Amino acid sequence: MEDQLQSLRQQYIENKDSTNTTTNTTTTTRSIVDTVGMPPVWRDMAATQQLRREKAERENARLKLVLESQIKLAKSMEAVMQRRTRQQLAGFNGVVADSVGSAPGSTWDLLLDKDTYDTLLARADAAYGEVDDVLAANGLKHLETACTNAQMREGPEGMYVDIFTNKMLPFDFNTAAEAVWSHFRGSEKHRGNLYENFSKDVESSSDTVAEMFAIEFMANDMAADFRVKQVVRRYIEDDRQVVVWVSTASALENSKSPFSSFGFREKGYVISKRVRGRDDFSMFQTCCLVSPQMSEGGTFDLSTVGAFTEFVLGFMFATITSSQQLIENVLMDQSLHPKPKEEATAKP
């Protein structure tokens, strides 16, 4: 993680220098434009420089945000690691093993028969009941400004990573909510090499989708193959739509990945809600809680646990960002190419 933080710091500094250079160039260009009375060629060049500057500023702000999030996560992990003994870490997620190594029969085992889709459906309903507490804990409940963050937390069941984002969209609630659900009930939400994917609507209302898929996740120049069982369910309220997903992932058999003994449990939320006083805007919130786990018979190693946690953080961040961008692209395309009124109002 230290290497990654150093890389982000260096990239942030380089982008900052680039932004300053571009700012100076833009200032000079504007001066020239004013002097010669804004001929088209200079006006176009000034516009190009302005776009470059704005792009550099946005990238600089993004890198700064990622760097701050990584630093916070690193400090949180360090504090947790120092507070616990090696034996306690061996049983993280609420199980304390007699010795450092495997924890047979514990919640680290991702292959228990009881973790079926019925269990996932129950977990989804339970997660929905906890949504307000989760949003209150990370500050999203009443937030109406943009943010992206990640924190390492400890709950009753052990350590987990809390990744959350908040963004305002220039689209009304109903339009945005429909685009969100269309994305998450489909397969585009999966970021990685999807080997196989079996999904079906669980209920006639099409508000619940069950999935089982094999996928290669990639992050931090590493790759790992997992088999995932997942349920995605939509809950509609008067002023809010809550999409909940819960999943259990285990490494594929005979995997050569350094994380072949690991997996994770995940629950996530995507909330679309109305903005007070602005019917033409809506809030778009994402929250993902991930608990890294070790399969039965796995060998505990502190450095590998840390590397796997960082790996999970990396591909979850990328997945969330990708979903946000795809949803925004769909909304933008719809606004640029609206359906004819009779088609939009026609019943299926």
Image (cartoon, helix red, strand yellow):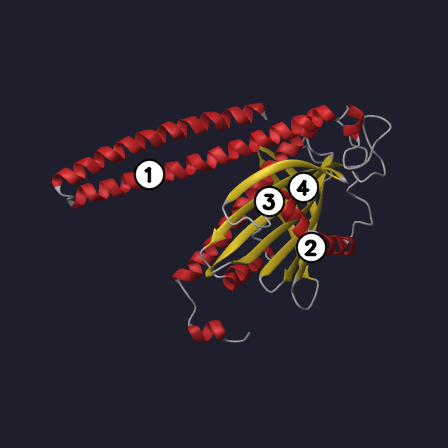
Q: Are marks 4 and 3 in contact (CB under 8 Å)?
A: no
Describe the element under mark 2 as helix, strand or loop.
Answer: helix
Q: In percent of the image, x 50 and y 36: which residue is there?
A: 65
Direction from residue 217 to residue 281 in the image, left or right: left
Is residue 221 visible in this depiction of the protein?
no
Q: Earlier in the sequence, mark 4 or mark 3?
A: 3
Answer few, some or many: residues within 10 Å of disc 1's Cα (few below 14, many 20 plus, some between 14 and 19): some
Question: In the rendered image, which residue does mark 1 sit on?
Answer: 52
- Give the Cα distance between marks 1 and 4: 37 Å
For the residues bearing labels 3 and 1, Cβ distance under 8 angstroms? no
Residue beneath disc 3? 139
Q: Which mark is residue 265?
A: none
Q: Is residue 310 above or below residue 329?
A: above
Disc number for residue 290: 4
Tag 2 or tag 3, which sits nearer the N-term? 2
| Residue 25 pos. (x, y %) | 26, 32
Residue 78 is situated, as x and y percent measured from the top left of the image, at 66, 26
Residue 82: image quadrant is top right
